[in-house]
Image (tube, grey):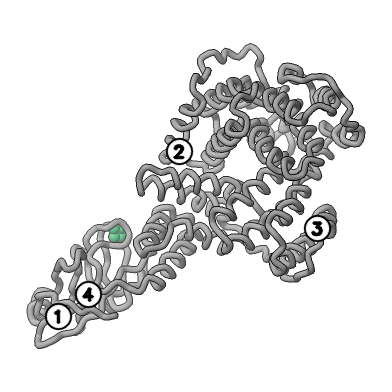
Amino acid sequence: MAMFTATGVSESELKAKGRKVVRRAGKQILLVAAEGKIFAVANRCPHEGYPLSEGTEGPGCVLTCNWHNWKFDLASGQALVGRDPVRTYAVEVREGEIFADLSDLPAEIQRKRALDGLVDAARDNDAPRMAREVARLERAGFDASTALTHLIGALNERLEFGTTHAHGAAADWLALAERAPSDAQRLAAILEPISHLTWDTLGARSYPYAEETRAWDANAFLSAVESEDEAGAIAFLRGALRDEVSRQELFSAMGRAALRHYADFGHSAIYTHKGGQLIERLGPESELPVLLALVRSLVNGTREERLPEFRRYDKTLASWHAKGTTPVHAEDFVGLSIDAALDRALLSSGRNPRELYDALLGAAAWNLLHFDLAFDRDTTNQIADNVSWLDFTHALTFANASRHICEGQPDLWPKALLQLALFVGRNKAYVNAQQDVEAFHVADAKRFIAVEMATLYDHGIVEPIIACHRIKMLFALEDELAAAPDAPWVDTMCAAMNRYLNTPQKRHHGLRLAAQARDFIAKEG
Ligand code: FES
């Protein structure tokens, strides 16, 4: 509803002066007389807030903000150069005095503008504008997390291989936002997955999802995933959503598909678990895009057990007899090769899965604690040894995800446990058992997690992939501790995370990259 307010400025005064700033209803309004017309716009430039009253007028009623040269059409507010439009106000002249309609735009219009602006900003990874648009959305009365839901939908087709860590860590960022001690920290946490998704889709083409719908059939869905038939798997997903198949049933099938292989080095299980959490947090509007991306990632996930070093997995799984009675501890796995770790797991196959799980998680924690940074710094290694410390973190997040999946479907435990053994055996090649770890002991796990989480509101890390692994680790640890506060791996895992989170890591391997490229091209032409 229009709400014209007297500006206290007469038409004749404005025409004589050309421009004038007035303050009404908590706003700074810039009145401009140009080319026989009168305009009213917000005086604060929508870019960084500098005063447009100091700007330069050009032909065609265009006002240039002199700070960064953005140019605004005074009639429409459109940014002819730059990005965000400037707010314009309708004006009327009543008995020689200028009145301006200072009423807020309807909330829905503000919402649409903010969301359109967010998608536009995502196209060129304009982080400051993304932050402004989400702040505008909040100011219009909407929860900032709806911006994430919108962006997930808008960018979904650009995820060529489906879910990435942007979705994978989003539920944790939202959980962190919920705990934020200030509004700014809350917004900072919500902006993290928004920036990450933007980063992951930057410059990507569109890869539309198949449109067909088929009646839900869990076994047929699993077969479609197994045969890498993305269109078929998506058709069953669409059928499940159409027929309102319960989320539990749907995620049971997803979990089964995720653990069918050592899929994507454990990422399929992680994405499945975290995808469910993300939908829970964002609500039904996020369900379709999150699940479409997840199914695509399940179909496309590499089946790592087909690699030579992991091939013993299938054989061990086939011989899983659930009769191994040997008690097991983390120490039993430390230092074992992949094949030896698989064999050792089999020896305890008849024990409570939780015992084997704790032993494997403990060994994974030991590996994480003892990572040899020489591998991180090496510039002369083979591509096969391009192992980063970050890779080790997946043993924890995979364990956390697979535990949840297996608690709902206990017949999947052998797969989850043997895949954990693959992590443990593979990572043992990159540790230094003599590593001095004394300084990383954590006396109070809960306090440690709280302190480390608090740093994430302002982590200062450029790459989203690094920050997102930090938050995923911390939430996984918190969740594992809640499930088993007295687990035998607690001290080792806390120390491992303490060392990981508080040790500088090399993030650019320019010389290694060049040396490996030269070596490869010299051999292969
Ligand atoms: S503040 Fe106006 S263009 Fe940057």
The amino acid type of the residue labelled 3 equals Ala
The amino acid type of the residue labelled 1 equals Ile
Q: Is residue 495 left or right of residue 489?
A: left
Q: Is residue 290 left or right of residue 123?
A: right
Q: Using the rendered view, name the quadrant where residue 264 is placed.
A: top right
Q: Nearer the viewer, mark 1 or mark 2?
A: 2
Q: Which residue is mark 3?
A: 218
- Visible residue check, residue 34: no
**At x 65% / y 30%, what residue is drawn?**
392
Whether tag 4 and tag 3 are in contact, CB under 8 A, the answer is no
> Where residue 343 sits: x, y (%)?
85, 24
Q: Is mark 1 within 8 Å of ligand 1?
A: no
**At x 55% / y 49%, what residue is drawn?**
170
Distance between mark 3 and mark 1 Cα atoms = 67 Å
Q: Earlier in the sequence, mark 2 or mark 3?
A: 3
**Local secondary structure at mark 1:** strand
Q: Nearer the viewer, residue 505 or 457?
A: 457
Whether tag 1 and tag 4 are in contact, CB under 8 A, the answer is yes
On screen, residue 62 above or below 267: below
**At x 75% / y 70%, what residue is drawn?**
213
> Where residue 315 sits: x, y (%)?
90, 34
Q: Is residue 514 left or right of residue 259?
A: left
Distance between mark 1 and mark 2 Cα atoms = 49 Å
> Where residue 474 sits: x, y (%)?
54, 35
Q: Which residue is mark 2?
A: 456
Rendered image: mark on residue 98: 1
Q: Nearer the viewer, mark 2 or mark 3?
A: 3
Q: Earlier in the sequence, mark 1 or mark 2?
A: 1
Q: Nearer the viewer, mark 4 or mark 3?
A: 3
On screen, residue 457 above or below 499: below
Q: Which residue is mark 4?
A: 40
* Number of residues whose C-alpha sits closer than 10 Å to that of mark 2, classed few (under 14), some (14–19) or many (20 or more): many
